[in-house]
Every structure is written in structure tokens, then in C-alpha cells.
Image (tube, coloured by chain):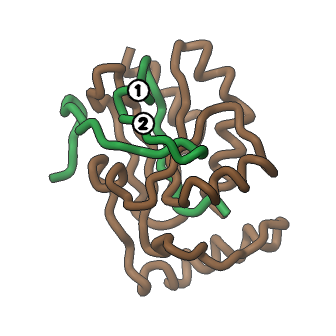
Chain colours: A green, B brown
Amino acid sequence: MVPQPGDVLPDVSLFRPDGSTVRLSEVVTGPTIAIFLRHLA
Amino acid sequence: MPCQAHLVEVAERVGEFRAFGWAVAAISMSRPEALTRYLAEKPLPFPVFADPDRAGYAAFGLGRTSWAKLLSPPIVWRYTRMVLRGARVRRVPEGEDALQLGGDFLVRDDRTLLWAHRGVDPTDRPSVDELLRAIRDAA
């Protein structure tokens, strides 16, 4: 299901560049623009 | 390349987002070690996270395009224009999905989605001005 404005996003896990894990709730500690990239390199 | 251009534009104007009290976070499907190498060469004024399994991409409802669309004349022409302006085409890094689409989202600190721009093609990104408008509308 594609989340719509008003939906609460799941607290997925991501990785910091050092390899440690971080939850989405630790990333968005305030209003945040989340930019999902295609390719960084 | 469109992602690089978008990142550069956002990085250059990150102060405008911060003036409204908004932070920026980028998420890449690169592996953490590839991110580390990239950021060592091209540091950014906001954090970048790795999502090699694309769980975050799925959670935000980001889909995939098709080879037919990726190689369609309008998309090829947009990439060609970028190359003519000096951008470099590189191979898709190992483990990354060439067909994965990107997107920009406004998220509240309780993980509520406020606004979404999901790319309909590989070159589809909102401008910084569109992001700022969305921030003002979300207030």
C-alpha cells in the first residue's frame, strides 16, 4: 500500500555510513525532508 | 545524474529549509561503505543514510520504472542534455537497482507523512522552490 499524507510511516531501519543501524524515528527527530535517491555514485 | 543535480541544488539551499525549521536527510540504496567513500569525496551539509535492501523505499511507496520507460526518447534526451552540460554517466553500482525510482517527502517527527513527490520517471524531481512551497503549505 502506498502511504498517503496523514499516514504514519513504519519505523524502518536504515544504516549510517559507518554501518550502524538507525531507525526512521531516530532520523526524523523534527520536521524532515526525506530525499530518496536513485543512484549516488 | 538527476539525483546528483537534485542533491546539489538542495545542499546549496539547505539554509532555506532550516529557516523554516526543517531538516534534510537523504537515503541511498548504496551500501554503507559506498556511502562513506562518496561522502569522503563529496561531503553534504545533511546526513545521508544507506538502505541497500530498500525497505525504506518500499515503506515510502516508491516503485520501480521499466526498461522501456528508462530508455524512452524523452528520458534519454534528458540524460543527453545533462551529459552535454558536463554530467558524467556511470555504471549502476553493484547491488543497486537501475529501475528503482526516487522521491522527496515531508515527514513530521512522529513519522506522519505530510507530502510526497514520488518520481514517475528517473529524472522526475521536485525543485527546491516546490519543496519550499510544500513546507509553507504544510505549516
Name the chain letter of the residue that bears numbered label 2. A
Q: Which residue lies furthest to the left in this view?
A: A1
Which residue bears the numbered disc 2? A22
Image coordinates for residue B49, horizontal then vertical, percent:
52, 44
Pointers 2 and 1 in contact (C-beta within 8 Å): yes
On screen, residue B75 above or below A12: below
Tally the numbered discs. Answer: 2
What residue appears at the point 64 percent right and 59 percent down from the top-left corner? B34
Q: Which residue is drawn at 54% across and 59% down?
A: B31
Is residue B43 depicted above or below A31 in this figure?
below
- As rendered, which of B83 and A2 lies closer to the eye? A2
Same subunit under labels 2 and 1? yes
Viewer-closest of B61 and B125: B61
Q: Name the residue rendered at 37%, 29% in the picture.
A: B107
Residue that mark 1 sits on: A26
Q: Is mark 2 on a helix, strand or loop?
A: strand
Quadrant location of the C terminus of chain A in the rendered image: bottom right
* In the image, residue B77 above or below residue B8: below
Q: In this view, does B23 lie to the left or right of B15?
A: left
* Residue B83, x across and y down, in percent: 77, 72
Q: Residues within 10 Å of mark 2 (few under 14, many from 20)?
A: some
- In the rendering, at what x and y percent does residue B98 appear? 49, 75
Q: Spatial distance from mark 2 to mark 1, Cα to Cα?
A: 6 Å
- Which residue type carries mark 2? Val
Q: Which chain carries label 1?
A: A
The kind of residue tagged 1 is Glu
Identify which residue is drawn at 50% across, 83% down: B72
